[in-house]
């Protein structure tokens, strides 16, 4: 199959899929946009065939996989309208994630109970609300915006007021803000693939670890590791995703639909937000349990057939990062180091045995200095091309076994750099799984 992978956000999220597809015998072209200054992004260079003009490849491709959902939406609309074989997020579906208002509206209009919220237009209005109610809030940007700088879950009313005043002084308060009531409980995600034939039978329940440091301390990086499991039956799916089917059909969506949720002590399910794209590193972790060809099932889904086969095992992914990570992440205005500063570090310890359990991200082909006899020679190897080089994957019939397998891979890899990763991915499920299973969620999943 002729496969075009469009990594239009430019973060290297499509490298793993492109490599796996090429290894499976497909003819792959992988596109990354240049940096703002015109420099080429080197993620995947020398590891997979790359393209420098994605629109010139659209007629060539038999399957087009979009990685993100924010860039070139106006240009992509033409190809969606013409019926190109695109697996990924069109404009209407992207709104569910990028415009919180639209997402909440669609949840409510399809009979799904949402967490109460109010909209404010200034820091003073938000502070007045906090003083009046005495509540802390989850504060999130409202409307058609992808700016995540103003996203904060306050620990207390005083914490919320301090944050709002700080945003106001820094000139960050623009537009409107969603003040969502905090709902205590266990955070869990539900996701499923959707196409012309409806929902795929393989449903994914997931548990993200978003904080940088062990014990959920430190800043929010997006995701440092995740635990997933595919099931055929899920209360979360029945209550949150299944009612959205008619809407997704109406907007001709093909791709992944995920909703992160809070399950309260009394069993209430509160939907938080959509992810309407290939999640990162969630999609990489799914590769560990997808059985058979890595992309044929995608082409089938585009054509209305559900051929995806997955293992019932638990899968764990651990993000391995280095350098100035997480500078430059969501809402981070700190200056990053020069583009090449954290590139060209060799990744030691890759073997034929652990390679299938490595999901490459910001890497490229390079060389490593090696002693041969009495000489130093350069031998080909995989080297870093950014500060997020890979995700270590593990699979097992329980969370702990899958986690052990992922950490076995992580511990076998070495970089002559400040390699960083969380060492506790999955541990909190020891106490969280019984809480969920009491309400018939994550049934059969063992720690």
Image (cartoon, grey):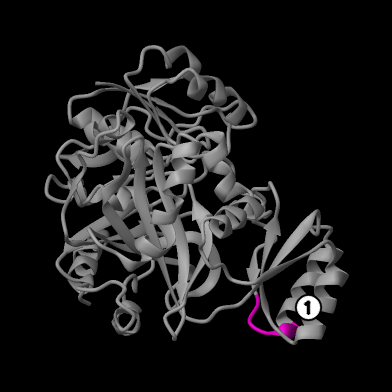
The answer to whether any part of residue 413 appears in the image is: no
Up/down of 361 relative to 83, above or below: below
Q: In the image, residue 189 lies at what x, y percent?
A: 40, 63
Residue 336 located left or right of residue 234: right
The secondary element bearing badge 1 is classed as helix
Q: Is residue 19 left or right of residue 103?
A: left
Instruction: Establish if 378 lies above or below 328.
Output: above
The residue tagged 1 is 161
Picture layout, residue 166 above or below residue 92: below
418 or 352: nearer the viewer: 352
Indicate yes or no whether the magenta region holds residue 221.
Answer: no
How many labels were placed on the picture? 1
Highlighted magenta segment, given as a residue range: 154-158
Task: Work out which quarter of the rendered image holds the N terminus and state it.
Answer: top left
Where does residue 399 sit, x and y in percent of width and height? Answer: 23, 71
Query: Which quarter shows the C terminus?
Result: bottom left
Q: Is residue 409 left or right of residue 12?
A: left
């Amino acid at each position: 199959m002729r496969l075009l992978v469009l990594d239009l956000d430019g973060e290297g999220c499509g490298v793993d899929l492109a490599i796996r597809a090429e290894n499976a015998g497909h003819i792959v072209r992988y596109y990354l946009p240049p940096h703002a200054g015109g420099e080429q992004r080197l993620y995947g260079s020398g590891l997979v065939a790359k393209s420098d003009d994605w629109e010139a490849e659209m007629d060539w491709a038999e399957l087009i996989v979009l990685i993100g959902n924010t860039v070139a939406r106006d240009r992509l609309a033409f190809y969606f309208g013409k019926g190109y074989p695109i697996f990924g997020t069109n404009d209407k579906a992207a709104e569910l994630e990028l415009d919180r208002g639209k997402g909440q509206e669609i949840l409510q209009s399809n009979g799904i109970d949402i967490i109460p919220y109010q909209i404010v237009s200034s820091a003073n209005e938000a502070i007045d609300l906090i003083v009046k109610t005495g509540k802390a809030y989850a504060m999130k940007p409202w409307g058609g915006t992808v700016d995540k700088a103003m996203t904060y879950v306050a620990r207390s009313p005083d914490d919320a007021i301090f944050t709002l005043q700080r945003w106001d002084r820094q000139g960050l308060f623009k537009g409107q803000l969603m003040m969502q009531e905090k709902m205590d409980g266990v955070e869990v995600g539900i996701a499923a693939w959707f196409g012309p034939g409806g929902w795929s039978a393989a449903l994914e329940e997931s548990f993200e670890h978003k904080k940088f440091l062990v014990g959920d301390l430190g800043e929010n990086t997006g995701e440092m590791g995740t635990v997933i499991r595919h099931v055929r039956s899920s209360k979360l799916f029945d209550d949150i995703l299944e009612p959205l089917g008619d809407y997704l059909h109406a907007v001709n969506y093909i791709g992944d639909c995920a909703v992160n949720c809070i399950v309260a002590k009394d069993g209430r399910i509160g939907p938080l937000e959509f992810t309407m794209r290939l999640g990162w590193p969630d999609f990489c972790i799914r590769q560990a349990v997808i059985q058979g060809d890595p992309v044929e099932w995608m082409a089938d889904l585009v054509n209305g057939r559900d051929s995806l086969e997955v293992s019932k095992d638990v899968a764990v992914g651990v993000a391995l990062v280095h350098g100035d990570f997480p500078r430059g992440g969501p809402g981070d205005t700190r200056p990053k180091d020069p583009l090449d500063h954290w590139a060209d570090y060799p990744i030691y310890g890759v073997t034929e045995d652990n390679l299938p359990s490595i999901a490459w991200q910001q890497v490229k082909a390079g060389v490593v200095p090696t002693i041969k006899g009495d000489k130093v020679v350069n031998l080909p190897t995989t080297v870093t091309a950014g500060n997020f080089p890979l995700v270590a994957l593990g699979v097992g019939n329980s969370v702990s076994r899958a986690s052990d397998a992922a950490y076995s891979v992580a511990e076998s890899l070495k970089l002559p750099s400040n390699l960083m990763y969380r060492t506790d991915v999955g541990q909190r499920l020891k106490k969280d799984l019984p809480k969920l299973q009491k309400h018939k969620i994550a049934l059969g999943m063992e720690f």
